[in-house]
Image (cartoon, rainbow, N blue to C red):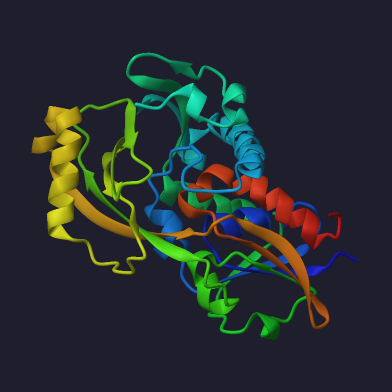
Amino acid sequence: MSAEVIVVGGGVIGLTTGIVLAESGHRVRVWSRDPAGATTSAVAGALWWPYRIEPERLVGEWALESLRVYGELAADPEATGVRLVRGVQYGERLAGLGDWAAHVAGLTEDAEGLWARLPLIDMPVHLGWLRARFEAAGGTVEERTVTDLAQVPADVVVNCTGLGARDLVPDPEVRPVRGQLVVVENPGIEEWFTSVDHEASETTYLFPQPDRLILGGTAQEDVWDLTPDPAVAEAIVARCARIRPEVAEAKVLDHRVGLRPVRPSVRIESEPMGRSLLVHNYGHGGAGVTVAWGSAEAAARLAAGRD
């Protein structure tokens, strides 16, 4: 008989891990403190690209597996929320990337930076699609708050709690990196743009979604505040307007803040927990969407005792 599994955490990592396990024949429940739309995943700009995540070799493998899946999902963008969109990583160079970059089709370098056609994901749509696929595989989602992993009643417990792992495990190596973004009406921008200094607390990006444009952003380490800062929002719009001047007059639709669960390296490992097996899958930083399917497969192998 397949093991009963409870996945704790209902963001993109938890739902994707639940899908892989359920479609492998396990009886799976996802326990989430918040509905998917209120998780950090829902705030993500969600361009596929390894960002603020280690270890590099494993991240490359997980990211490429996820890229393959997103390429398939992009065949039905209205349902899955996944589209392949062209854009530029301004100032980036191939020489600065890991071995994974050689496997990204169409990735080219010019004087501006690196150009590619990559998955850009509409997270509210995608999270809804993930839940529907999970439930179609026999899984169930329950809103529950977990304060002690050892009290979760299942043969296998998979910890996909992101930043929550800091207190729940506890793991003090998990830290927040605050991201703020501004959502505006799209004045006709069709290509994405990013300019990232990995040592700075400010980033610049423009991500066109079907009915809006997402402007960013920030990378403020060890900041827990989820309240949008009007001054930060104004600076974000100003930076993006220097790239595309038409942004300056775009109507603001929303302000969003999320806390990336950053760790020196992603934790995917298992340990005994009483009569249960505890599998950890957290610490994905700013690249949870980028590695979701690859890391889910790695966690599922541990849950099934194959690694």
Q: Is residue 125 left or right of residue 193?
A: right
Nearest to the observer: residue 36 or residue 163: 163
Q: Is residue 135 visible?
A: no
| Position above or below: 160 against 88 | below
Point out residue 93 in the picture as x, y percentages from the top left corner.
Answer: 44, 24
Q: Which image quarter is the C terminus in?
A: bottom right
Extreme residue in the right direction: 1
Q: Residue at x 57, y 48 (%)?
A: 54
Nearest to the observer: residue 239 or residue 254: 239
Extreme residue in the left direction: 249
| Quarter residue 278 falls in | bottom right
Point out residue 82 in the picture as x, y percentages from the top left corner.
Answer: 48, 37
| Quarter residue 21 falls in | bottom right
Q: Residue at x 30, y 25 (%)?
A: 190
Nearest to the observer: residue 244 or residue 113: 113
Point out residue 33 in the picture as x, y percentages from the top left corner.
Answer: 50, 74
Q: Is residue 278 left or right of residue 189?
A: right
Q: Which image quarter is the N terminus in?
A: bottom right
Q: Is residue 214 left or right of residue 39?
A: left
